[in-house]
Every structure is written in structure tokens, then in C-alpha cells.
Amino acid sequence: MDTKRKMPILPVEAYISEEWFDKEQEIIFGNSWQFAGLTEDIQDPGDYITVQCGHQNIVIVKGRDQRLRAFHNLCRHRGTQLLRAVGKKQKALTCPYHDWTYDLSGQLISVPEKEEEFPDLELDKICLHKASVDIWRGMLWVHPKPDAEPITKWFEGCWEYLGPHDPTRLIEYPDTIYEKVINANWKIVAENYIDVYHLSHLHSNTLNMYDHANAKYGFVGDHYMFWEPLAKVYHDNLDKLSPTKRIKEMTDEYIGAYVPWLFPNTGLSETDSSWSVFHTIPLAPDRTKVVVRSKIEEMTDWEFYKKSAKSNMSWHGLMGGETKYGNDDPNDPMATGDFMAEDVYACEQQQKSLKNPLFSVAATALKGESTVRTFQGIVEKWMSK
Amino acid sequence: MFHKIKISNINHPIKDAATIRFDIPNHLYEQFNYHPGQHLIIKFNVEGKEARRSYSLNSCPHNNEALEVTIKRVKGGLVSNFANDKLKVGDELEIMIPQGRFYADINKDAYKTYFLFAAGSGITPIISILKSVLYASPNSVVNLFYGNAHQDSIIFRDKLENLKKEFPQRLEIVHTLSEPKVWTSWEQWKGKKGRIDTENVEWFINNYPPIAQSTEYYICGPGAMNTSIRKTLMDLGIPKELIHIEQFGGKKDDGNNDIKAIDNAQLKATLNGKQFDLIIPNGKTILQVLKEADSNPPFSCESGVCGTCACKLKSGKAEMKSNMALEDKDLNKGIILACQALPTSENIEIVFE
């Protein structure tokens, strides 16, 4: 293999090859706890959602005892996927193909024409394959293995580096979900999220409410922890500038932005006025879907309008209003003033170069990109397991 | 084996109950280790007569607390009134090391939601489990549903309130009163009313859903309540191995009475390293025969509740009249309660482990 073509730890093929992608799905995504939604996504007994973990689709359903159960979403008969997306108040799980039916604990309870067609089949010996599900920090998490380590063990040591937010108390407003398919490998997206060096450059005019020079960051196990203080002008004018109500728990003692990356594919962004989860779903070696869901303090429409109008009015004068490359082209992501658009653009531009024979990484920043090297080292460790 | 232990403190959490603290001497410290939920068997001497009772420990083994039991007065109760009226600090009682199969196995790395159900003095093992989870399993959470007759009969009310203040995120407590006093000198009852019945258990589960999805259910109260809670939980789809029950005041003829016991079955018993070969006359339990033979078997309640007389059936068959102490996993291993067991084969062999 061409040893020069490293990213700089992982080989370039880790970002472009189908083979590597499949192996990653199996080894990393088939063996780790993954974000599956917010606790309120499954409200009542019989409600369910489905989530993809690597090659495996998993259904999470709430029982009448209010406990969540997770099963691999395939019928034990001939493997048909039982359920799609989300649903309400199921009494049982029925396979669309031949109507084999399972109760909410995954037990097979009926098979059509059993006496004639399956006289020897013992229903009580057949159960859907179990997976693990738990709730952590107001989020649903699944693990494809039935005997996964406790979620608290997986995230051991992380809690103290996260914000004081209580996400279960905050409100997700309708139409605030951001979904985008990015033409880049999921690791490019993750590396962009944890790249400290780029913050003052790519986002020089968009994330200027934070004091990047005083950021604190590091890894706890395989998870990346990040905190940075507010920029002085933003901090001093927080009431005027923050677009939504300040989070109640975000007292002066805690103020700042907490932006961890939870291995393998979930970012959080916990700030003075919002709480967001950034879910990265690998679709192909060069395609990744990102779903961002945000929560804020409860506000009436009028409060919301007033607060954002005040923020908009104050922003230009205090924070500056220029975008990185002027603002004459409405289709230029670098002119939108939206840091997400800037990141998407950077990720896609990097992916484009990976197949170029001249591609190489000349050097990476000692501190500001140490995070990227560590992340790649973690992926490498998993892949050689 | 009983040990003479001195009472180091007595206080009254409510008017009609006494919490008795024991001063365990250093050399017995290890032996008196226990799991939260277990009980002590105490030998009392009341008016010249010996009486044995088992009382759950309400202290927490994970918090350096001295061992404590709490004894609630029972109308006409020999021992409970004696304990409340006559015992004083400095008295010695004979007690056996902690035992019992009703307990929570606390794991510091676990992430679990504990659902605890207690009625009246059933709070004693439950509060021990509750404190142990809070102090020794730092990620786990507890939901307690606690039933009493009225405001003045709530044992450990203040203690529970303080724990709620100490662990606001990890502890939920719901009191329910079956006969709340409309007026007391200091409050009007605004909380939940009624017993811990099917409807209230479902209400509790729905309103306090588990955070950690790995769950355990511990129930301690009178027999009828325990049975009804267990049935309700199982009807909701909770596997029975997650439900643990401790009963107060077991009834003798509650169980299966049409056991076809074998007349004069041969019993071979291994106890304290000794072999006993005995005959079991019709109608007698294994324990009765062993006691008559002066073999000194372990026992306490003789009602199938405490589990002290549990032994292992090595060969032959036996059936129990009643069983409130053993769970399915014990039964599958061949464990039986000697005080309830009648032989149903000609020869049986048991061992006390």
C-alpha cells in the first residue's frame, strides 16, 4: 500500500472503499451504543421506532410496563423486515409477508395455518433476536448485542465534561429538524466536528461568539470532550444577542459551549441557549446523512419572535455581519453566514480530492488537529479488533 | 448459631415502632456482613419464655451504618410490645447472622431502575435496598411506592424526605394512605389515597416510567398485597424473575394442603457435618422430625416465610405446604423449606448447606 497516502493515521481507502465501509459497519456500528432518538419519540406502550445500526435494523418498542425493548427487525420465519420507521400503539408485531405475529416482548404468538403447515413448530421457543436499549441524558441508545455493557459504562467519565443541561426538560419545536445528505465519508464529517484548528478560520465570521483560543478539549475513552468560553463581547451582551431564552441551568458558573463527539457517530452541542444532537448516519463511503435535532427553553411564539428580533438587531453592530467571502452570491455556501453550510462545503470539497493521485496530507496541526489524529487512531484500533 | 449482641441505641421513628441498633463487636464484623433486604433472627426472652422472630434490617450495609431493625407494635403481639416497652440500651439479645433470600445484589457499575413497593413495616428491608442503591450504585435510580394507614403510621418519613433532598434526580417517592386523617395538628393530606392495589400500581408505573431500562421490582408487605402487586406487574409483561417478594406474617394453611405425603418415609439428613437417619410419621414436616431428634436445625418463622430452614433435596421427592421465601431459581436447584416440606417418596435425602 502507498504509505504516503494517509489521512494522516488512517489510509485514504478508509474514506473511499466499499470494502472498508462494510467492515466498519460490521465492526464499529455492529458493536457500539448508538443514538436512536429522543426519549419522547416513544411515548406510550406499543409505540415504536426503527433505527439502523450498521447492517442491522433494530426496532425499539415500549411495553405496557413502560420498559423499552429492542429487537432486530427481522421475522424469524424468512427474515423479512417487520416494521418501518415509526408507529403508534401496536398491540403486537406482525410480519407483512405471512402474518407471523410476535407480542411486545418479542415472543412468537401466532402463525397462520399452524396445524396444517407447521405441526411441529413450538411457538414458545421462537423469539425475535434481542438487542439492547437504554436511556441516557434524555436520549435513546441502542446496541445490536443483547448483552451490551451498560450505557453508563460506555460513557464512563464523560458526564462531568458535559453541560449542566437537562435535555428532558427542554422543548423540541416542530419543523426544527435539520436533515442533509453530505457527499463525504462519515469520518470526514466527524473530523470536521472535532477539528479545533478550523474554528477560527472556516468559521471566522460565523462562530465568533465563542473564544476558540481558550477552548479545552481531550478524549475520555473513545469519546471527544470539548468546551470553550463565550467571546467577551457575546458574553457581555448575552441577553441581547442570544437568539432564544437562556437555558435555566446555564448559570455563569457553567457558561460556555460544550461540544463533544460521542463515538462513533454522535455530536452534541450544548450552549447557553440551546441543546442539539448531531446524528451522523453513514450511507455509503462517500455519502453521509446528518440529522440535527435541537431543543430550547419553552417559549411562546411572541417571546420567540421578540427574542430573535432583538438578537438580529443587535448582532450586526456587536458581532459584525460580514461572511467569509462577501455576500453577493446567494448560492455560495461560504456566503450564507451559516456555519453548517460552511462545514458541509468543506467536507465535500475534501472528499472530492481523495481519489486524486496527487492527494496527500502534508502535515497536521500540532494541537488544533491532534483531535483528528486521535480519532483516526481510535477507528484504527476498532478496525484491528 | 446465636451471638449475644448489645443494644447501643433505641429510637422511635413513629409512636408505635422501635428502631433498635446493635453494637456488633469487631470480631463478628465480617460475619455480620449482609445484603440489603436480609433479616436477623432474634431470640427474645419474654416472661421466661423463649420466642424467635425475624426482623428485616433497615440499615444500609454500604454506608457504614450500625445494624438496625425496626419493630412495629402489633395489637396483642408478645414480642413486638415487649420490644417497644421493655427493651433498653445496654440490654443484650441473642441474634443470628443476617440471612434471607430477599435482597438486592448491588453492583456499582449497574445502570438500573429499582421499583420498590412497601406497606407499613414492610418499609424496613425496602429502605435498606433504597439507601444501598443510592449510595453504592451511583448511576441507578429508585422509585418508591409506600402505603400506610394514615400520616402517623409512616415509618421513616423524615429519613425518606432527607434522602429525596440528597438525591433529587435519582429518587422518587410516592406515599399513599388508605385512611388518611383529615386533620392533624400540622397538615392536611394532599397526597395519594388508597391502597397499593392493581389500579394504583399501574398508575405508579405509568407516571414513574423507568429511566434506566434494566429494572428490578422489590415488594414487601402483607401477603394479599404482595400477590396482587406481583400479578399486576406480570400482567403488564414484567418477567417474574425481576420481581422479588418478602412477606410479613405468613399464614400456615395458606398453601397447598392436599399433598399426598408418604407415611413413615425414610429421611437421610446432613446437618452441621452430621448424618441423621430418621423416619417421618404422616403429617409431620421434615423440620419437626429434625427438631424432635435434637439435631439443632436452623429455623425461625416456621411458616415458610423467612427461608432460614432452607435445605437442598439431594434425592427423593418432597412438596411444600406453603412457600413465600423461595424463588423459582432456588426451586430449580432443589432447594426446599424444611418447615413446610412433606415427603412424597419413600426415601428422601437432604443436606443443609
Image: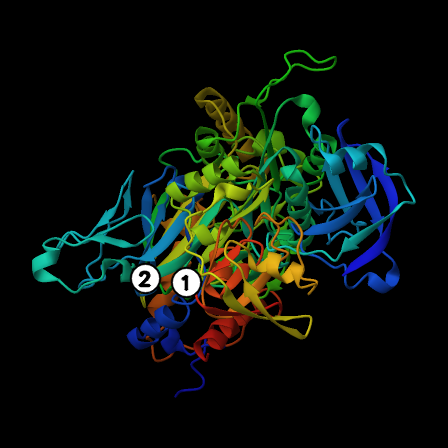
Specify whether B337 is left or right of A76.
Answer: right
Chain under disc 1: A
Residue at 29% x, 39% y is A88
Is any atom of residue A16 visible in this view? no
The kind of residue tagged 2 is His
Where does residue A41 sit, x and y in percent of width and height? 38, 41
The kind of residue tagged 1 is Pro
Say if A118 sits above or below B217 in the image. Answer: below
Whether the residues at callouts 1 and 2 have beta carbons within 8 Å, the answer is yes
- Of all residues, the one furthest to the right in this rendering is B90
**Number of residues whose C-alpha sits closer than 10 Å to that of mark 2, classed few (under 14), some (14–19) or many (20 or more):** some
Nearer to me, A11 or B255? B255
The part of the image, by quadrant, that contains residue A349 is bottom left
Which residue does the numbered mark 2 point to in the structure image?
A129
Is any atom of residue B133 visible in this view? yes
Which residue does the numbered mark 1 point to in the structure image?
A146
